[in-house]
Image: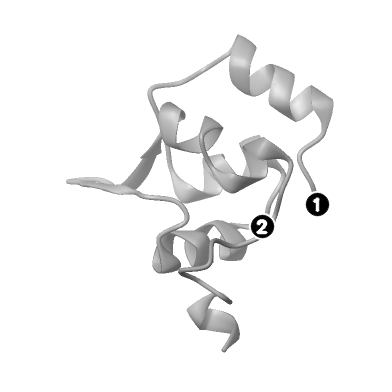
Amino acid sequence: MTATPALIRDLFLHPRPTYTPAAAAEAIGMSVEDVEGWMEVGELEGESTRDGVVLSWAELVSSPWASGSRRRSKRHSAPMWRR
């Protein structure tokens, strides 16, 4: 699944302060496994809370998917879970 214009529009028109990995995956059209993998390698940075890890709205909209590119930075050639 990929981010569609409708998903992107909804993310900007109805922002939430934070998203669980599952809610973030749904909001940006990715699988939960991909979101967690991106968190593992540092492409998405989660915040630990007493209820678990969450992603901020700002983190989601500044992530690589938001630029239309799924390329990884030079720092990360592949997610650790795919090595």
Q: Name the residue beneath numbered marker 2.
A: 31
Q: Residue at x 65, y 44 (%)?
A: 65
In the picture shown, does residue 78 fall above or below 26?
below
Disc 2 residue type (three-letter): Ser
C-alpha span from label 2 to label 1? 7 Å
Task: Residue 1: give x, y in percent of width and height.
Answer: 80, 52
In the picture shown, does residue 9 fall above or below 23?
above
Task: Residue 69: give x, y in percent of width and height.
Answer: 71, 48
Task: Residue 76: give x, y in percent of width and height.
Answer: 50, 71
Q: Earlier in the sequence, mark 2 or mark 1?
A: 1
Element at label 2: loop
Labels 2 and 1 touching (C-beta < 8 A): yes
How is the structure coloured here? one colour
Q: Name the residue beneath numbered marker 1.
A: 1
Mark 1 neighbour class, 10 Å CA radius: few under 14, some 14 to 19, many 20 or more? few
Q: Is residue 17 left or right of residue 35?
A: left
Element at label 1: loop
Q: Residue at x 48, y 49 (%)?
A: 21
Q: Residue at x 74, y 41 (%)?
A: 68
Q: Residue at x 74, y 28 (%)?
A: 7
In the picture shown, does residue 7 fall above or below 37?
above
Disc on res. 76: none
In the picture shown, does residue 41 fall above or below 10?
below
Disc 1 residue type (three-letter): Met
